[in-house]
Amino acid sequence: MYREIKLKIISILFVTVFLLQSQIVMANQSNGLVVTGNGKIIVKPDSVRLGLTIFSEGDTLTTIKKDVDKRTSAVFSLFSKLKISDKKYSAEGIIVQRQRDYKTGKFRPYVVTRNINVTLNNIERYNDLVDGLFSRGINRLHTIKFYADDSNGSLANMALASAIRNATDKAKHMANIAGVTLGMALSIIENPGSNVVMQTFRESSVKSAQFVPSSIDVKASVQMTFKIGE
């Protein structure tokens, strides 16, 4: 009996707290102005990440594997020549494929593939890197990502400050049109997808791969709630 009474009291307290919190939220929403602010700063890229592929095709597995190994070694030598640290590149394991032709039932030639990823922090050597890669026999560049180093977060913070100013200006404008008084900020939430400091391209040819963007955007977005009064 005592336990049942205790459980009922706990249930009543829980419902009471929930209702009070709901009323507070409703009050904040009814007396608040919610706006979204976007910020952007333009910076010059200083680094690039490349994804490249080397592959060979033939009927003799050992021969085409040696060909891929030879070109991979040449690419690594290029990295060393351009003073790219071995910590800035990595090579995936060799992939061997051989499929059967569904019409004839015969096996197609072997295909040996190796993917390599490299980061170049000296953007001035970008064209030297691309020219050198193709002259050493890579088959394609499948990903090119230009970005600005923001390891200390300064670029992201600048974009975030711009987004907050944009949201504040927007709130002031809306309050002025509505004829209400804009009060203090009640909350600031950073939206997902902010702080983009990278621009990605997917290329395959030498000419298109040599394109270097003059600038990239660092973006931020926030949602702010302001207190309003009559």
Image: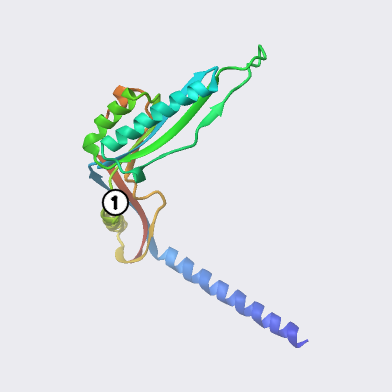
Q: Secondary structure at mark 1?
A: loop
- Locate residue 145 relative to residue 68 in the image: left or right: left
Kindly identify the residue that appears in the image at 39 percent across and 26 percent down.
140
**Image quarter in which the C terminus is found:** bottom left
Where does the image place residue 168, in percent across and percent down from the top left?
Answer: 28, 58
Where does the image place residue 131, in percent across and percent down from the top left?
Answer: 28, 26
Residue 211, quarter of the rendered image: top left
Residue furthest right in the image: 1
Name the residue beneath numbered marker 1: 150
**Image quarter in which the N terminus is found:** bottom right
Amino acid tagged 1: Asp
Residue 7, quarter of the rendered image: bottom right
- Locate residue 5 relative to residue 210 in the image: left or right: right
Give above or below for 137 relative to 30. Answer: above
Closer-to-camera residue (213/33): 213
Closer-to-camera residue (22/112): 112
Kindly identify the residue that appears in the image at 54 percent across and 22 percent down.
61
Where does the image place residue 42, in percent across and percent down from the top left?
Answer: 24, 44
Viewer can see residue 213? no
Kindly identify the residue that appears in the image at 35 percent across and 34 percent down.
76
Give above or below for 199 relative to 192. Answer: above
| Label total for image | 1
Viewer can see residue 151? yes
Where does the image place residue 99, in percent across and percent down from the top left?
Answer: 61, 22
Residue furthest top in the image: 104
Give above or below for 123 relative to 174. Answer: above
